Image: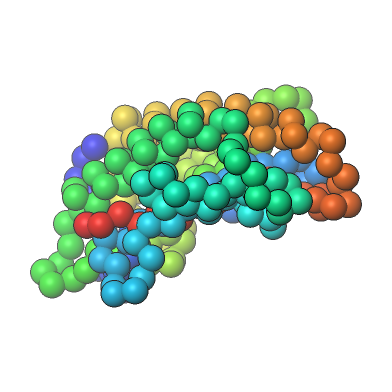
């Protein structure tokens, strides 16, 4: 991965986050699977350095730390269960994402004395009406939305002018672009299909109608 330069205007919060998309409701009645990942290279005392949470709609289905050794799973009705069938495969992908984030952090160049800002990544995926796979990524820096990435078109969109350096660098990094694309419209939709299977027998009124949301917040020491 290439060196990433962050604009000084984004260095307001000592946290680095890798975000996944917001606009996933293209098909309102379609379920969507989302991951929300936050990396904090400068966690303060008593701050959570690593936390992973998964949600379906507004219901938690997973909670663990970044070591993936202490994991709590919940069914669609909020009852604790032993495991999620495809979690082992997801763990491998999430480790790759964390490695990518760590690389981005180590490649960043900051003004002297400035702490790294948060880099927040939100990835979502869903199946279109015709059965096609769709995905999106949203990246925020220090809590400020900076970039959007459409994996279907490979298009990067700058939302905040302070993210111009990142846009220029990341959109020219083919390895990063293809990795984000593979995860969001390759792996994610497949897991979504598996997650939906046990929900078919659950009453919609109990679970609520809407999109699936799986969010992960991870803090990795700098």
**Camera-side residue: 52 or 135?**
52
Compared to residue 196, the image places residue 62 above or below, namely below
Compared to residue 7, the image places residue 204 above or below, namely above
Tell me the quarter of the image containing the N terminus: top left
> Based on the displayed image, in which of its 4 quarters is residue 152 positioned?
top right
**What residue appears at the point 26 percent right and 47 percent down from the top-left corner?**
102
**What residue appears at the point 29 percent right and 73 percent down from the top-left corner?**
44
User: What x and y, as percent, mark residue 10?
Assistant: 32, 67
User: What x and y, as percent, mark residue 39?
Assistant: 35, 56
Q: Residue furthest front?
A: 82
**Camera-side residue: 164 or 27?**
27
Left-right relation of 9 to 75? left
Left-right relation of 159 to 9? right
Left-right relation of 117 to 109? right
User: What x and y, as percent, mark residue 103?
Assistant: 24, 44
**What residue appears at the point 18 percent right and 62 percent down from the top-left corner?**
110
User: What x and y, as percent, mark residue 126?
Assistant: 66, 37
Tell me the quarter of the image containing the C terminus: bottom left
Residue 216 visible at all? no
């Amino acid at each position: 991965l290439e060196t990433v330069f962050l604009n000084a205007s984004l260095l307001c919060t000592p946290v680095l986050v890798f975000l996944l998309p917001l606009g996933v409701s293209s098909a309102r009645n379609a379920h969507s699977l989302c991951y929300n990942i936050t990396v904090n290279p400068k966690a303060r005392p008593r701050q959570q350095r690593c936390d992973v949470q998964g949600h379906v709609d507004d219901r938690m289905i997973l909670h663990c730390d970044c070591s993936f050794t202490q994991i709590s799973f919940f069914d669609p009705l909020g009852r604790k269960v032993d495991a999620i069938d495809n979690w082992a495969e997801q763990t491998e992908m999430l480790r790759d994402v964390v490695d990518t984030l760590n690389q981005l952090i180590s490649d960043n160049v900051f003004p002297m004395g400035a702490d790294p800002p948060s880099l927040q990544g939100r990835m979502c995926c869903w199946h279109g009406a015709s059965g096609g796979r769709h995905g999106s990524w949203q990246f925020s820096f220090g809590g400020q939305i900076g970039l959007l990435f459409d994996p279907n078109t490979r298009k990067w969109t700058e939302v905040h002018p302070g993210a111009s350096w990142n846009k220029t660098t990341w959109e020219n990094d083919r390895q990063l672009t293809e990795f984000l694309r593979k995860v969001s419209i390759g792996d994610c939709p497949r897991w979504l299909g598996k997650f939906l299977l046990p929900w078919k027998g659950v009453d919609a009124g109990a679970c609520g109608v809407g999109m699936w949301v799986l969010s992960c917040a991870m803090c990795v020491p700098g």
